[in-house]
């Protein structure tokens, strides 16, 4: 019997979610593999050789000095007072998306200097 990739794909398109779930479990059992392993690596597993090109800077806690945090966010983002206050008041908030490593570290340092807690993603 020849392997018919197109027929298998057509069958998968017609299958229910429950059937697909059963298929995944059967493949895992038959070949002693786990479908979750590749997902964990792709989702950001610790890969020593990988370098990240851009970072999202997230303010996770504003700290006790909210006014200083708002001023820092305004300086970093160029936002108006109302928008900067909204980011600080509604933590966790992404302050900057797609920042370079140096830029992300500079932003983190500025926010931590005024008592904020920052996470780089």
Image (tube, rainbow, N blue to C red):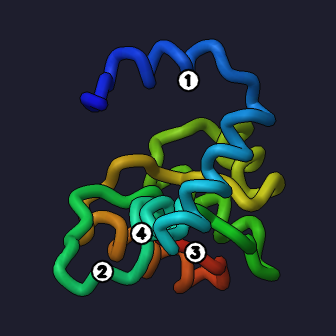
**Residue 121 in sight here:** no
Q: CA distance from mark 1 to mark 3?
A: 44 Å
Evaluate if marks 1 and 3 touch, with contact meaning CB atoms under 8 Å apart.
no
Q: Earlier in the sequence, mark 3 or mark 2?
A: 2
Q: Nearer the viewer, mark 3 or mark 4?
A: 4
Is 69 placed above or below 117 here?
Answer: above
Evaluate if marks 1 and 4 touch, with contact meaning CB atoms under 8 Å apart.
no
Q: Earlier in the sequence, mark 3 or mark 4?
A: 4
The N terminus sits in image quarter: top left
Tell me the number on the disc at residue 118. Answer: 3
Badge 1 density bin: few <14, some 14–19, many ≥20, Cα 10 Å: some
Q: CA distance from mark 3 to mark 4?
A: 24 Å
Tell me the number on the disc at residue 47. Answer: 2
Evaluate if marks 2 and 4 touch, with contact meaning CB atoms under 8 Å apart.
yes
Evaluate if marks 3 and 4 touch, with contact meaning CB atoms under 8 Å apart.
no
In this rendering, position of residue 43 left or right of residue 47: right
Is 79 placed above or below 43 here?
Answer: above
Q: Earlier in the sequence, mark 1 or mark 4?
A: 1
Q: Which residue is mark 1?
A: 12
Q: Residue at x 51, y 74 (%)?
A: 32
Q: CA distance from mark 3 to mark 2?
A: 22 Å
Q: Which residue is mark 4?
A: 41
Residue 51 place in picture, x, y as percent = 20, 71
């Amino acid at each position: 019997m020849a392997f018919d990739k197109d027929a298998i794909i057509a069958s998968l398109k017609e299958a229910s979610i429950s059937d697909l779930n059963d298929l995944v479990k059967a493949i895992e059992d038959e070949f002693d593999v786990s479908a979750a392993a590749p997902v964990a690596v792709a989702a950001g597993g610790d890969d020593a050789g990988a370098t990240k090109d851009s970072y999202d800077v997230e303010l996770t806690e504003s700290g006790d000095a909210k006014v200083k945090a708002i001023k820092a966010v305004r300086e970093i983002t160029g936002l108006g007072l109302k928008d900067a206050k909204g980011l600080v008041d509604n933590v966790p908030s992404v302050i900057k998306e797609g920042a370079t490593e140096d830029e992300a570290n500079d932003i983190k340092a500025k926010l931590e200097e005024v008592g904020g807690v920052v996470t780089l993603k």
